[in-house]
Image (cartoon, rainbow, N blue to C red):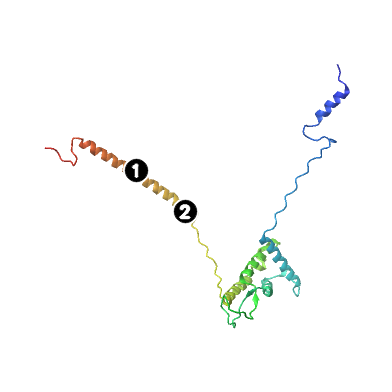
């Protein structure tokens, strides 16, 4: 008996569509793709570094005559640091001030406000990194120039005298090499194991000697080692 055309067409249609997948016209839209994860916000250091870099580039554009980054030198960086002193908030006493060298002056004075040495030092570190991240060559980095390092050292020394606050660098403690420490632990473990083995051997020898003396003299001998007459 031959099958009808309707039944054969339905069988072919059901076999051509895999199970679980929506067929065209079934009314089930395909699942939407998962959204891409949002990028992590920049850290506080990265945000500050970007602001400092933009400030320096703006300073170069406003410079008279205008300067390009390729022509910038260590002398221009020092000019930029001196320019920032007008926005400082740290009182730096002049040599003729009565509060010179006092960390906590009792009253106000007419000495200028400047950028603190610590702020300038951190600023140069961020700008030095931003320069190289922007494609600058490390050997041509104006923020790493020797003149800039000398200027920062002079600012640190002068502010330490004027404010009476010494700037001391923390000394890092040198840690012993890991190999030496490991060998010391190994030798120490070997010595402790050998000493424990020697102690165990001595205890065994003493026990053997004690048992031999009791057995040799026998139970006939009275305590104290004296013989009966």
Q: Is residue 182 above or below residue 48?
A: above
Q: Check disc 2: other Cα within 10 Å, few if <14, some if 14-19, many if 20+.
A: few
Identity of the residue furthest to the front in this view:
106
Identity of the residue furthest to the top in this view:
1
Can residue 215 be seen by looking at this rendering?
Answer: yes
| The C terminus: image quadrant | top left
Residue labelled with disc 1:
200
Counting labels gives 2
Quadrant location of residue 218? top left
Picture coordinates of residue 155, whole percent (x, y): 61, 74
Q: Secondary structure at mark 2?
A: helix
Picture coordinates of residue 211, whole percent (x, y): 26, 38
Picture coordinates of residue 145, whole percent (x, y): 64, 69
Quadrant location of residue 71? bottom right
Q: Nearer the viewer, residue 168 or 150?
A: 168
Q: Secondary structure at mark 1?
A: helix
Q: Residue at x 34, y 43 (%)?
A: 200
> Of circles 2 and 1, which is in front?
1
Q: Is residue 132 above or below residue 156?
A: above
Q: Check disc 1: other Cα within 10 Å, few if <14, some if 14-19, many if 20+.
A: few
Q: Tell me if label 2 and label 1 are in contact, CB under 8 Å.
A: no
Of callouts 2 and 1, the N-terminal one: 2
Circle on res. 229: none
Q: Residue at x 44, y 49 (%)?
A: 186
Circle on res. 181: 2
Q: Is 138 displayed left or right of 6 in the figure?
A: left
**Marks 2/1: CA distance?**
28 Å
Can residue 136 be seen by looking at this rendering?
Answer: no
Q: Residue at x 47, y 53 (%)?
A: 181
């Amino acid at each position: 008996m031959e099958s009808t055309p309707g039944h054969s067409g339905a069988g072919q249609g059901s076999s051509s569509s895999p199970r679980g997948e929506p067929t065209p016209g079934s009314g089930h839209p395909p699942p939407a793709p998962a959204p891409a994860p949002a990028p992590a916000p920049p850290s506080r250091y990265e945000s500050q570094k970007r602001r400092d870099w933009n400030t320096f580039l703006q300073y170069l554009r406003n410079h008279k005559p205008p300067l390009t980054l390729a022509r910038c030198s260590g002398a221009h960086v020092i000019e930029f640091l001196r320019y920032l002193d007008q926005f400082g908030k740290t009182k730096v006493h002049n040599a003729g001030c009565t509060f010179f060298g006092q960390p906590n002056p009792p009253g106000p004075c007419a000495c200028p406000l400047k950028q603190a040495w610590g702020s300038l030092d951190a600023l140069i570190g961020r700008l030095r990194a931003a320069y190289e991240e922007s494609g600058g060559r490390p050997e041509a980095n104006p923020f790493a120039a020797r003149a800039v390092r000398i200027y920062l050292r002079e600012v640190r020394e002068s502010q330490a005298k004027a404010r009476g606050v010494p700037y001391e660098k923390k000394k890092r403690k040198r840690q012993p090499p890991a190999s030496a420490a490991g060998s010391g632990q190994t030798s120490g473990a070997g010595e402790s194991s050998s000493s424990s083995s020697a102690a165990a051997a001595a205890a065994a020898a003493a026990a053997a000697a004690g048992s031999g003396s009791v057995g040799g003299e026998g139970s006939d001998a009275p305590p104290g080692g004296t013989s009966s007459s």
